Image (tube, rainbow, N blue to C red):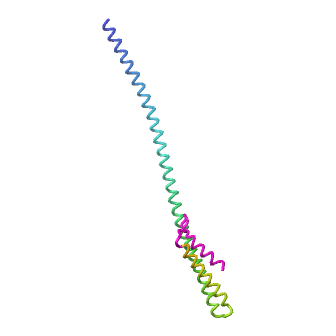
Amino acid sequence: MEDNNTIKKLQDALSQLLNAYETLKADSEKMSKEIAELKNDKDELEFTIEELNEQITNLSNTKELQSTKMGEMLGRIESILSSDTVSIDDDTNSDDDNSSQTETTISAVDSINYNDKDTSDESTTDNNGVDMSRMQSLLNGFNK
């Protein structure tokens, strides 16, 4: 009888061990699937990050290019306005009848310079790197 009890206990212990092994094996397989899914998610996220970084780089390059072109355009406008002012001044020096036009031009230039001094103390550069005070003074030059 004692042998039967021992055998029964051994069978019960073996049965418990097999059940525990099967449970652990199922858990291991489930975790392996989750790990594979997480790796796929990680790869997708890394790819998305790379794409977003490329877009950021492209946007930065575009912003720099636009700022450069905007500066060049403002410089050209300034040179056009300054050459117009010089030609107006030359015309008025040759004609005494146009002295009022010379005074108007000088006052316009002085007001632009005064406006530039007022706005130079403030930070008037917008988020795109455009100097708003410079742009305003150019627009004032068109109103002559």
Q: Is residue 28 above or below residue 92?
A: above
Magenta span of residues = 120-144
Which residue occupies the extreme top position in the image?
1
Q: Is residue 37 above or below residue 92?
A: above
Q: Is residue 132 left or right of residue 5?
A: right
Q: In which quarter of the image is the N terminus?
A: top left
Residue 27 sits in quarter: top left
- Give residue 143's position: percent from left, percent from top: 66, 78
Q: Quadrant of the C terminus?
A: bottom right
Q: Is residue 92 above or below residue 46?
A: below
Q: In this view, does 61 lie to the left or right of 88?
A: left
Total number of numbered discs in the rendering: 0
Q: Which residue is drawn at 42% across and 25% down?
A: 23
The foreground one among 94 and 66 is 94
Q: In this view, does 131 lie to the left or right of 1?
A: right
- Give residue 115's position: percent from left, percent from top: 58, 76
Which residue occupies the extreme right position in the image?
97
Q: Residue at x 39, y 18 (%)?
A: 15
Q: Residue at x 64, y 94 (%)?
A: 94
- Give residue 43's position: percent from left, percent from top: 47, 46
The foreground one among 49 and 113 is 113
Q: Residue at x 33, y 12 (%)?
A: 7
